[in-house]
Image (cartoon, rainbow, N blue to C red):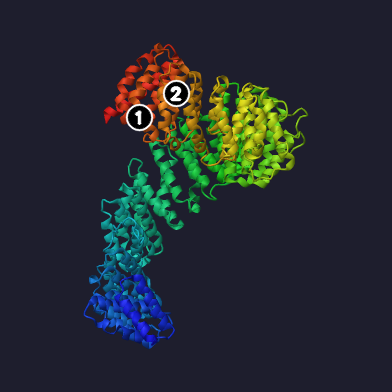
C-alpha cells in the first residue's frame, strides 16, 4: 500500500470526525509522518484538496484546522523558511474568511514558534491582521488568538518590533478596541503595558497616547466578578492589577488620568474610590517627575480634602500615601508643593480650637514621612511652633491636643529617627511634665503622655540609656502611685513591656530592683496583698526574655525563702503561679531553652519543697510549682526527657543524689508514706513521651510503684493526695505498662466490694486504658457495668462512671498522655444499651438510680454529635423516671436531662429538638418537682429549677416562649421556699424567663 494513501485516509477521517480527541490524535499522527519525512506538508495540503475551497464554511474551517493542528504538533525546527513563507501566505490569504477565522488564527499562532519564521515575516503578518480582520465580529476564542499572536511576535522578535513601533501599535489598537471578555482584557492590558514601558517606542508614543489611554481607561473601574466555579480562574483583582499596571506605565497619560480618576472618586462606592486612589498612587510612583511637576497643584487640591474631611479611613490612608509619594517624586524638582503643604496646614495645626487641627497634622506629618529632607522642612515650620506652645501654660484641652499632634509626628518618623533629633529635649520635657505634673484625675492626658514616651523609647537609636532610664523610673513610680487608676496603670505596664523588648537592661537595672524592693515581707494586710498582686503582675508581664526571666525566677524564689514563715499560703502560691505563667510563655516561643531550665530552675523549685515542709501543706501551692516542671518536661525532646526522668526517679524512688536535689533519708513518697511532693513527680513525668527510651532499671519498678500507690491510697483521705496517686497509677498504665493491667486488676476485683480505694483505682486504670482504646480497657468497662446491679458498690460505681469520660486536667493529650480519637464514641456505644436495659430491668428504685447517675455522668462529657443518634433511646427512660416516687431517682433523672442539654452544641441539634418536642410534658413535671409540698427534696427542687433554666439557654426560643407564663406562675412556690439555696436558684430562673418574654415582646 502506498504510504501516502494511509495518510490520505487519515485526512478524510479527520474531516468526517466530530470527536476532538480523535482529530487531535490524527493531527499528531500526520505531524509525526511529516517529521519523519514519510509525507511532505505540501502533500497534506493536496490531501485536503477540495475541502479547502468547499462552499460549506464548516468544511473549509475543518480543513484549515487540520493544517493548523498538524503544524502545532511539529517540532519547531522542522519547517524550512520557504515552507513557512508559503504557509504564512496561505493563512494570511484566508484572514478575510470570517467563517474560518478561528483555525486560520490558530494556524498562524502555531506557525510563529517555527525557527524558520523570521522577523522579516512579522511586518506582513501585522499588516494582514490590521487590513483583513474585523475582531469585533469574531468569537472570543478568535480574538484571544489575535492577542496571543501579538504577544508571541513581541516575545520572539522584540528588537524587530521595536523598529516598527507604529505598525505594532496601530495593529494592537485595531485588535483591542471594543474588547469586553476578561480573558482577552488580561492580554490586552499586558500588551498595553509592554508597549508603554518599552523605551524604543517612546518617540512614537505621543501621537498614540490618547488612543492608548482610551482603550485602557474605558474599562475603569473594573466591576467584573467571576462566576462560580469559573474554569479560567480570572479574578477581579487580576484585571484591576493588570489595568493599573498599564495605566501607570507611562507619564504620557498624566494629563488625562489624574483628572479622570479624580472624577471617579466622586462615586458613592467605596470600592471604586479605593480603586481610583490605588491607581493614582501607582501612577505617581511610576511617572517621571517632569510629568508630575505641572500637575502637583491639581493632585494636591484633589486629594487633601480626603485627608481633612474624608469619612472612610481607607480613602484617607490612600490619599495620604499618594500625596507623600508625590512629595518624594518631585522633591528635587519643585519646592512649591511643600510650601503649599506647610502654608495650608500650619495655622490649622496651631489652632487648638479648630476641629480639623488633628487632621491637618495627620496630613502634614503623613507627607513629611516621605524622606528626611521633607520631614525636616515640614516639621520645622509646623511641629516646632507647636512644641514651643506646648512648653507654655496650657489648658487641658490644648495639652491633649498637642500631645496627640506630637504623637502623629513621632509615628510618622518611625523610619526616620534622625528627623526627631532636634525635638528630643522638648519632647521629653513636655511629655514628662504632662505625665508627672498633671492632676491624677486627668487620666486621658497622662495616658497620652505615656504613649508618647513609649514611642520615643521604641524609636531606634533615639534616646540614650540614661534618658530611657529616667522615663522607666517615672513609669515604675506610677505603677504604685496609680493603683486605683486602672487605665493609667495598664497603659504604663504595657509600656514597660515594650521597654523590656527594646531596652532590657533598663528593666533589669531599674524596674526589677525597684519592684522587688517593694514586695512586702508578708501578706498579713489587705494593702500587702494588693501590693503583691500589683508587683507580681508587673514582673510577670515585663519578663519578655530569658535573661529577664532568669533574674525574676531567682529573685522571687529567694524572696519566698524570706517570707514563707510569716505569710499565708497565698503568697507562695502567687510566687509559684507567676513563675509558671512566665515559664510557659517563654517555652512556647523558645522551647529549646528547656534544657537550661532543667538545670537552673527545676532544682531551685524542687529543693525548696525538700527543705521547707510547710510549703507542702497547701495543695494549690505545690500544684502551681509542679506546673513549672510540667512545662519544662513538655518542652524537652524525647531523648532529652530520658535524663529528666532519671533525675525524677533518683530523687523520688531510688532515694539518691539527683540533679534536682538531695533527698532526706526518710523521703519515701512512692513507697509507704503519702507525700504531697508526689505531685512534683507526677507533673514532671506526665509529659514524657512514650517514644522516650526509659532505662530498664526504671521500667522494672513501675509495677511496684503502682502496687505501693494503691497501698498508700488506703492510708489517706486527703482528696488532693488521693487524686495525685490515682493520676500517677493511671499515667503509668496509659504510657508504659498497659500489659500489666490484666495481672494487676484480677486481685483488685476481689476487694472492690469492701475497699473504696480499690474501686477508685479500678476506674482510673480503666480510664487510662480506654483513652488509648486498649481492648482490655473496654473489657473492664463491661465489668464495671455489672457493679451497678448492687446497692452499696453500685452507688459508688455510678458516681465514678464520670471518671471514664471526663477530660482530666493532667492526664490529657495536651500534656502527653496517649489519647486516641473517638474513644468517647466507642465507649458510649458500648455502654448505652446496657445502661438503658439495666434501668428497665432493675429490681428496685435504688438500683435504677445507679444506672441513671452513671448515665448522667457519661452524658455530661459526650459530644452532641455522639448523642444525637441515641437520644430517643434513653430519653424515654428519663421521662418515665420522673414519675417514680423516689427522690434520688428523680434527682438523677433531672440531672441527666440537664447534662444532655448542656452537652448539645446548638439549639438546632437533634438533642435539643428531641427535648423540645417533650416540653409540654417536661415543664409541668419539673414545676411539680420544685414544690416542697410534693415531697420533693431540696436537691430535687434545685435540680428541677436548673433544668428549667437550661431550657432558655439551649432550646430554640420559639419552642420555649409558649411555656413562659406557665413557668412564671409555677415558680411562685419555689420563690417562697424555706431553703435559701432553692430561692436563689428560683430567682435566677424566673429572671431568665422574664427576659425571654421581654425580648419576644420587643420583636
Residue farthest to the left? 55
Q: Between residue 238 and residue 881, name the one nearer to us.
A: 881
Instruction: Give left or right: position of 809 versus 190.
Output: right
In this rendering, the answer to whether 1001 lies above or below 503 is above
In the rendered image, which quarter contains the N terminus? Answer: bottom left
Residue at 37 percent across and 65 percent down: it is 289
In this rendering, the answer to whether 587 lies above or below 989 is below
For marks 1 and 2, give the CA distance: 17 Å
Residue at 38 percent across and 20 percent down: it is 926
Instruction: Give the image location of residue 73, x and y in percent.
Output: 40, 77
In the rendered image, which quarter contains the C terminus? Answer: top left
Instruction: Give left or right: position of 901 versus 577.
Output: left
The residue that mark 1 highlights is: 916
Instruction: Give the image location of residue 139, x and y in percent.
Output: 26, 69
Q: Where is residue 953, by image quadrant?
A: top left
Secondary structure type for disc 2: helix
Q: Where is residue 210, by image quadrant?
A: bottom left
In this rendering, the answer to whether 992 lies above or below 435 is above
The residue that mark 2 highlights is: 893
Instruction: Give the image location of residue 973, x and y in percent.
Output: 37, 14
Disc with the residue nearer the chain's start (1 vs 2)? 2
Instruction: Give the image location of residue 92, x and y in percent.
Output: 29, 81
Number of numbered callouts drawn:
2
Q: Residues within 10 Å of mark 1 (few under 14, many from 20)?
A: many
Residue at 62 percent across and 34 percent down: it is 730
Q: Between residue 52 and residue 378, name the one nearer to us.
A: 52
Instruction: Give left or right: position of 375 versus 357.
Output: right
In this rendering, the answer to whether 317 lies above or below 391 is below
Amino acid at each position: 500500500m502506498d504510504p501516502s494513501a494511509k495518510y490520505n485516509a487519515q485526512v478524510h477521517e479527520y474531516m468526517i470526525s466530530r470527536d476532538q480527541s480523535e482529530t487531535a490524535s490524527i493531527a499528531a499522527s500526520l505531524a509525526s509522518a511529516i517529521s519523519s519525512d514519510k509525507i511532505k506538508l505540501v502533500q497534506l495540503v493536496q490531501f485536503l484538496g477540495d475541502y479547502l475551497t468547499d462552499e460549506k464554511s464548516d468544511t473549509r474551517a475543518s480543513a484549515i484546522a487540520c493544517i493548523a493542528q498538524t503544524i502545532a504538533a511539529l517540532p519547531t525546527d522542522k519547517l524550512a523558511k520557504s515552507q513557512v513563507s508559503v504557509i504564512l501566505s496561505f493563512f494570511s490569504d484566508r484572514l478575510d474568511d470570517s467563517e474560518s477565522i478561528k483555525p486560520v488564527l490558530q494556524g498562524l499562532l502555531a506557525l510563529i514558534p517555527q525557527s524558520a519564521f523570521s522577523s522579516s515575516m512579522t511586518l506582513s503578518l501585522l499588516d494582514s491582521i490590521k487590513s483583513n480582520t474585523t475582531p469585533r465580529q469574531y468569537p472570543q476564542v478568535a480574538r484571544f488568538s489575535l492577542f496571543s499572536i501579538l504577544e508571541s511576535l513581541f516575545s520572539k522578535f522584540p528588537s524587530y518590533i521595536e523598529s516598527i513601533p507604529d505598525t505594532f501599535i496601530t495593529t494592537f489598537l485595531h485588535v483591542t478596541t471594543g474588547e469586553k471578555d476578561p480573558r482577552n482584557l488580561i492580554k490586552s492590558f499586558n500588551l498595553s503595558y509592554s508597549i508603554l514601558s518599552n523605551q524604543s517606542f517612546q518617540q512614537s508614543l505621543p501621537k498614540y497616547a490618547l488612543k492608548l489611554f482610551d482603550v485602557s481607561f474605558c474599562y475603569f473601574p473594573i466591576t467584573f466578578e467571576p462566576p462560580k466555579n469559573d474554569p479560567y480562574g480570572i479574578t477581579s483583582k487580576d484585571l484591576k492589577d493588570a489595568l493599573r499596571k498599564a495605566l501607570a506605565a507611562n507619564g504620557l497619560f498624566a494629563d488625562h488620568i489624574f483628572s479622570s480618576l479624580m472624577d471617579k472618586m466622586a462615586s458613592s462606592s467605596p470600592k471604586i474610590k479605593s480603586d481610583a486612589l490605588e491607581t493614582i498612587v501607582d501612577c505617581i510612583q511610576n511617572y517621571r517627575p517632569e510629568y508630575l511637576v505641572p500637575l502637583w497643584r491639581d493632585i494636591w487640591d484633589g486629594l487633601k480634602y480626603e485627608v481633612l474631611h474624608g469619612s472612610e479611613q481607607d480613602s484617607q490612608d490612600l490619599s495620604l500615601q499618594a500625596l507623600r509619594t508625590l512629595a518624594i517624586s518631585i522633591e528635587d524638582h519643585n519646592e512649591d508643593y511643600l510650601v503649599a503643604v506647610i502654608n495650608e496646614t500650619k495655622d490649622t495645626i496651631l489652632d487648638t480650637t479648630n476641629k480639623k487641627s488633628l487632621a491637618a497634622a495627620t496630613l502634614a506629618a503623613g507627607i513629611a514621612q516621605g524622606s528626611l529632607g521633607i520631614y525636616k522642612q515640614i516639621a520645622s515650620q509646623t511641629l516646632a511652633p507647636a512644641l514651643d506652645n506646648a512648653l507654655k501654660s496650657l489648658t487641658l484641652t490644648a495639652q491633649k491636643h498637642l500631645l496627640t499632634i506630637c504623637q502623629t509626628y513621632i509615628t510618622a518618623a518611625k523610619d526616620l529617627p534622625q528627623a526627631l533629633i532636634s525635638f528630643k529635649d522638648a519632647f521629653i520635657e513636655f511629655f514628662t511634665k504632662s505625665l508627672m505634673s498633671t492632676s491624677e484625675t486627668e487620666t486621658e492626658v497622662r495616658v497620652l503622655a505615656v504613649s508618647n514616651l513609649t514611642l520615643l523609647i521604641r524609636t531606634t537609636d533615639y534616646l540614650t540609656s540614661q534618658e530611657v532610664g529616667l522615663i522607666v523610673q517615672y513609669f515604675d513610680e506610677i505603677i504604685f502611685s496609680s493603683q486605683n487608676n486602672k487605665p493609667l496603670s495598664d497603659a504604663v505596664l504595657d509600656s514597660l513591656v515594650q521597654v523590656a523588648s527594646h531596652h532590657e537592661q533598663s528593666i533589669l537595672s531599674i524596674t526589677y530592683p525597684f519592684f522587688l524592693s517593694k514586695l512586702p515581707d508578708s501578706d498579713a494586710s489587705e494593702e500587702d496583698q494588693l501590693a503583691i498582686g500589683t508587683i507580681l503582675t508587673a514582673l510577670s508581664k515585663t519578663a519578655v526574655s530569658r535573661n529577664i526571666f532568669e533574674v525574676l525566677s531567682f529573685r522571687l524564689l529567694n524572696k519566698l525563702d524570706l517570707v514563707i514563715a510569716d505569710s499565708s499560703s497565698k503568697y507562695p502560691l502567687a510566687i509559684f503561679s507567676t513563675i509558671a505563667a512566665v515559664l510557659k510563655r517563654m517555652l512556647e516561643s523558645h522551647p529549646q531553652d528547656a534544657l537550661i531550665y532543667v538545670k537552673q530552675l527545676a532544682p531551685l523549685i524542687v529543693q525548696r519543697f525538700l527543705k521547707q515542709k510547710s510549703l507542702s501543706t497547701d495543695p494549690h501551692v505545690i500544684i502551681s510549682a509542679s506546673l513549672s516542671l510540667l512545662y519544662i518536661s513538655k518542652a524537652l525532646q524525647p531523648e532529652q526527657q530520658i535524663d529528666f526522668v532519671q533525675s525524677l526517679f533518683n530523687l523520688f524512688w531510688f532515694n539518691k543524689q539527683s540533679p534536682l536535689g538531695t533527698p532526706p533519708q526518710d523521703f519515701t513518697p512512692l513507697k509507704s508514706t503519702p507525700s504531697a511532693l508526689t505531685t512534683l513527680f507526677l507533673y514532671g513525668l506526665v509529659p514524657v513521651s512514650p517514644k522516650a527510651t526509659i532505662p530498664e532499671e526504671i521500667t522494672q519498678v513501675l509495677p511496684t510503684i503502682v502496687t505501693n500507690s494503691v497501698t498508700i491510697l488506703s492510708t489517706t483521705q486527703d482528696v488532693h493526695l488521693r487524686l495525685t496517686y490515682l493520676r500517677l497509677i493511671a499515667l503509668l498504665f496509659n504510657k508504659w505498662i498497659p500489659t500489666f493491667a490484666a495481672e494487676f486488676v484480677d486481685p483488685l476485683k476481689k476487694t472492690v466490694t469492701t475497699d473504696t480505694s480499690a474501686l477508685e483505682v479500678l476506674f482510673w486504670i480503666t480510664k487510662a486504658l480506654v483513652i488509648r482504646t486498649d481492648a482490655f480497657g473496654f473489657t473492664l468497662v463491661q465489668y464495671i457495668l455489672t457493679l451497678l446491679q448492687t446497692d452499696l458498690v453500685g452507688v459508688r460505681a455510678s458516681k465514678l462512671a464520670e471518671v471514664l469520660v471526663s477530660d482530666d486536667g493532667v492526664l490529657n493529650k495536651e500534656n502527653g498522655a496517649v489519647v486516641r480519637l473517638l474513644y468517647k464514641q466507642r465507649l458510649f456505644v458500648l455502654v448505652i444499651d446496657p445502661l438503658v436495659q439495666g434501668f428497665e430491668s432493675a429490681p428496685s428504685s435504688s438500683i435504677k438510680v445507679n444506672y441513671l447517675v452513671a448515665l448522667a455522668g457519661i452524658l455530661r462529657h459526650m459530644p452532641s454529635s455522639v448523642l444525637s443518634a441515641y437520644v430517643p433511646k434513653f430519653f424515654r427512660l428519663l421521662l418515665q423516671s420522673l414519675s417514680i416516687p423516689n427522690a434520688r431517682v428523680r434527682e438523677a433523672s433531672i440531672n441527666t436531662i440537664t447534662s444532655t442539654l448542656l452537652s448539645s452544641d446548638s439549639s438546632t441539634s437533634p438533642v435539643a429538638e428531641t427535648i423540645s418536642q417533650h416540653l409540654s410534658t417536661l415543664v409541668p413535671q419539673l414545676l411539680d418537682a420544685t414544690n416542697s409540698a410534693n415531697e420533693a427534696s431540696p436537691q430535687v427542687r434545685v435540680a428541677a429549677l436548673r433544668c428549667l433554666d437550661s431550657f432558655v439557654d439551649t432550646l430554640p426560643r420559639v419552642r420555649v416562649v409558649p411555656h413562659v407564663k406557665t413557668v412564671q406562675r409555677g415558680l411562685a412556690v419555689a420563690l417562697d421556699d424555706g431553703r435559701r439555696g432553692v430561692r436563689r436558684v428560683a430567682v435566677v430562673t424566673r429572671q431568665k424567663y422574664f427576659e425571654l418574654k421581654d425580648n419576644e415582646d420587643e420583636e
